[in-house]
Image (cartoon, grey):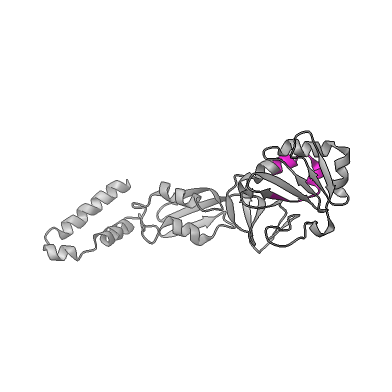
Amino acid sequence: MPSLIVALALVSVGVAVATLPVEKLRAIDLTAKLNGLMIAAGFGIDQVNLSGQHYTADSDVFDALDLQNVKTFAAFDSDEALKRIERIPWVDTAQLTRNYPGTLDIVIHERVPAFVWTRGNTNYLVDATGRTLGPVPAASSWNLPRVVGSGADSEAVLMLSALRQYPLIERQYAYGERIAERRWRIVLKNGSELELAADREIEGLQEIASARQARVAITGKPMIVDVRTSGRIAMRALPAASVRTSSLGGAGTTSVASAQQ
């Protein structure tokens, strides 16, 4: 139907200008004329209703619609607009519905943060797919696990999933630090550090949880527990000057017991 209206409008414009000299034809804004005819025919986009968004900026959605350049439903490509909207970091899915005659309803379904990732001096919310949603807002609180280090955003979900299998360790978790984009160091609330091997998070955590001698490091005095060598647990006391806790600050580290927005 829109294509038919466009065709009829073009015919109408053509009849109106067919008898004009070439120099006057050049002065006519045919696009504006066509838009005017589409709006008059009930195909104008007069109102946009946006709902479901909490952290997605309204301005980002309206920019994705490109309504400054697209003023009618005849020219509006809903598929392309939907793709642009769903590229907005916080947006998971969106639904676009036209309500006759000139209203566009948009319902946003947002992504759910899974953890807080510290990069430099900024904390970011990241979802379970590893998609960075944006800096932690300042309006409310998040109770999410924290990770730090280059590459931690894309690998944290697997480590945190492994951690959930060992509640004794999980309850004492302060934050996870990605080392050289290869492996994890888990820092506990008491300052103990669990050194895990690359791609052996589950095995390493299982070894620590199963070893009676390692349990003292989980809730007692801070120690380094190294399980990077399969079947071998190396433990040593952590010097007081080297202890990092959930309240630490400084380059490359952050508090991670909870995420404050």
Res 227 → quadrant: top right
Give the mark count: 0
In this orientation, does residue 112 appear?
no
Front-lying residue, 171 or 50 = 171
Which quadrant does the C terminus fall into?
bottom right
Where residue 179 appears, as percent x and y from the top left, is: 67, 48
Front-lying residue, 248 or 108 = 248
Residue 169 drawn above or below residue 36? above
Q: Left or right of 65: which side holds 194? A: right
Query: Outermost residue, top direction?
Result: 231
In this orientation, does residue 246 appear?
yes
Identity of the residue drawn at 50% across and 49% down: 86
Q: Left or right of 158: which side holds 76? A: left
Residue numbers of the magenta segment: 160-177
Identity of the residue drawn at 73% across and 47% down: 185
46 in the magenta segment:
no
Where residue 245 appears, as percent x and y from the top left, is: 79, 56
Identity of the residue drawn at 78% across and 36% down: 206
Res 250 → quadrant: bottom right
172 in the magenta segment:
yes
Where residue 148 appears, as percent x and y from the top left, is: 67, 53
Where residue 19 appears, as percent x and y from the top left, is: 11, 60
Which quadrant does the N terminus fall into?
top left
Residue 147 drawn above or below residue 234? below
